[in-house]
Image (spheres, rainbow, N blue to C red):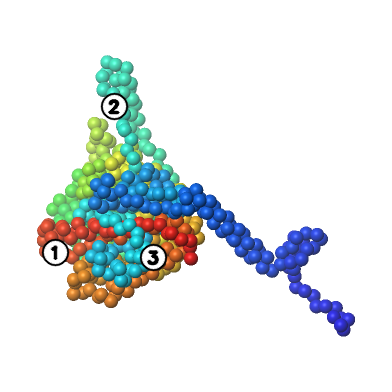
Amino acid sequence: MTDGSEPPLEKVEVVDGVRGGKEVGGRKRKGRGGDKSDEKRRKKEEEKAKQEEEAREEKLYGGEGPEFELKLLEEKKIWIVPKDLQSLVLWLVGEAENPRWIFVKNKALCKNVVTICLDSLTLPVWTKYGKEHMPFLHGLKFHQISTKLQTPTKHIKSNSFLDEFFNKEVRKTREQPIPSHNPNNGVGQALQMLQGQQHNNHHEEVTVPQIAVETAVKMITEYKPSVEDLMEHGFYVSTVEDNTFVETKEADRVLKDSEKIIVIDCEMCLTEHGSELTRVSVLNWCGEVLYDELVKPHNEIVNYLTIYSGITAEMLENVSTTLEDVRSTILTRYLYKEVTIIGHSLENDLKALKIIHHNVCDTTMLYPHFQGPPLKSALKYLAIKFLNRGIQGYKGKGVPQEERMGHDPVEDATAALDLVKMKFEKGRNFGVPSKMKTEPMLRKVEGKSIVIDIPDCISRIPARGCSTDLIPVGSDLEAAKKARKQIASGRYAFSFTHMHLLETYMEALEWADPLTSSMADEEALIKILNDLDTTIKNFYEAAPKHTAFIVATGQVNGVEDAEDESSEEYLRKWDLARQGMAFIGFKKKAAE
């Protein structure tokens, strides 16, 4: 300063002897922006090292990238199923045997797999509009393969593709033959002794795991059935089936976790107008009784069904509580749209209460009958088999039965609750017949996975115990933005994004043929195809080099209604709904 005054004090930050980017006391210092510049330098060094490693790997393979070579003709396959796509993903970035229908050349160069599901993109639509209105996907020259759901015709659900793709069949192990029961040899005597011990200890119940309600609230979403599941099991899903029913409403307050799960069991009698409610019990997750009420039917009772319900004329003699009273109490105190109901064959309980509710956890679905739907295992059988507990007087096959009159709804509700707790503790395959057992496909992926989809679909993805991020989104636009960012990061060995634009369009057409229906809006369809193509282009450009891409068209989720649903034409349309396409290829150049 020329005027001799002191220079103004410089505002500096001192951290561990570092001030203003200069050294203090001989120690190294960082100035403003130092951390950011170091971070940029580190990222550049990592990217450089990654590129050098990729170059070395490519050199090992003669400078060639990975390639797919189809072996469909050799394997005499006309189409592939979602399980085949699953096997391909796991062969590339997980644990699986080499799929026989495809050969992957230079597989070691592939570190990432991106899968995009485009429900309802049919071959006729692709044939007519693909080249012009999905030019990027068309121009990639990926292998185009026909696909088909394994789900039988007319049993297709909106998530059949997801169920088949994300559930991996558990490989069956060869069972050892049971030695013949000859009481005269040592093996026979040992078996007799063991059976005697089992019979003597039959009264010792299984210890039910104690699971915190906060944990249960998170776990129960994995077992939430779809609307199609509910319909298949006989639930009413709307008031269209019966306008005397009432749909549950959203809570007018924030519910505590302890309020988000209840257990319901009802008893019914037979009246002049059919089955009617006579008793209802409501429990919480801890098994505490919240509500237990007898109900007077509106119509004259012709059979109390006492042997099953436990209800007698004397019990109802002074009862004045009606179905409307009970329903009002339950709907205003315990049951809201957000609440999950646990129970056994809940379709019957909800019909007795005349309530429409989709959020259920039903033991008949968790513990399926070994012969499959529509057969269901009785609650008393499940209780004795998996809880070692006798209910309803049943003590097991070959064991003298307890003489008692009717069921106890609190006892039944408690058994259903404990069966759910056992399922949560033991896992998805507990209580499932061997031929139905599956495990999460994502558990076999080596590295992290990410699945981006709407909440209803996310809830069906089996990901417990997997290194997987499940990202719920509200729209295709949101899904595309989030997925592109995560694909570009290269952090995920496997990413799955589900797009619903075309499915929504088809639903608006009531599943009519979009090429011939009078309701079809060609301009809207073309815009959807353009948007989907742009999404695929953005994903492709963001992905690391050598990323494998699988674009699967999933399924068509319905067909037009028909007067004769057993007609060949109707069944043919459902068979077409199972069919789709898959486009498979690798990214050739580095991310843009």
Q: In the image as oriented, which residue stretches furthest toward the top?
A: 184
**Between 283 and 344, which is closer to the camera in this rendering?**
344
Q: Position of residue 557 (x, y in %)?
A: 25, 61
Q: Which mark is residue 178?
A: 2
Disc 3 secondary structure class: helix
Q: Is residue 521 visible?
A: yes
Instruction: Name which of mark 1 and mark 2 comes first in the sequence.
Output: 2
Spatial separation of the CA atoms under disc 3 and disc 2: 55 Å
The amino acid type of the residue labelled 1 equals Ala
Between tags 3 and 2, which lies in front?
3
The amino acid type of the residue labelled 3 equals Ile
Mark 3: give few (<14), some (14-19) or many (20+) Cα within 10 Å.
Answer: some
* Residue to which mark 1 is pinned: 562
The residue at 38%/69% (across/down) is 534
Q: Is residue 253 visible?
A: no
- How many marks are shown on the rendered structure? 3
* Residue to which mark 3 is pinned: 536
The amino acid type of the residue labelled 2 equals Ile
Spatial separation of the CA atoms under disc 1 and disc 2: 52 Å
Indicate the quadrant containing the N terminus: top left, top right, bottom left or bottom right.
Answer: bottom right
Disc 1 secondary structure class: loop
The residue at 19%/72% (across/down) is 517
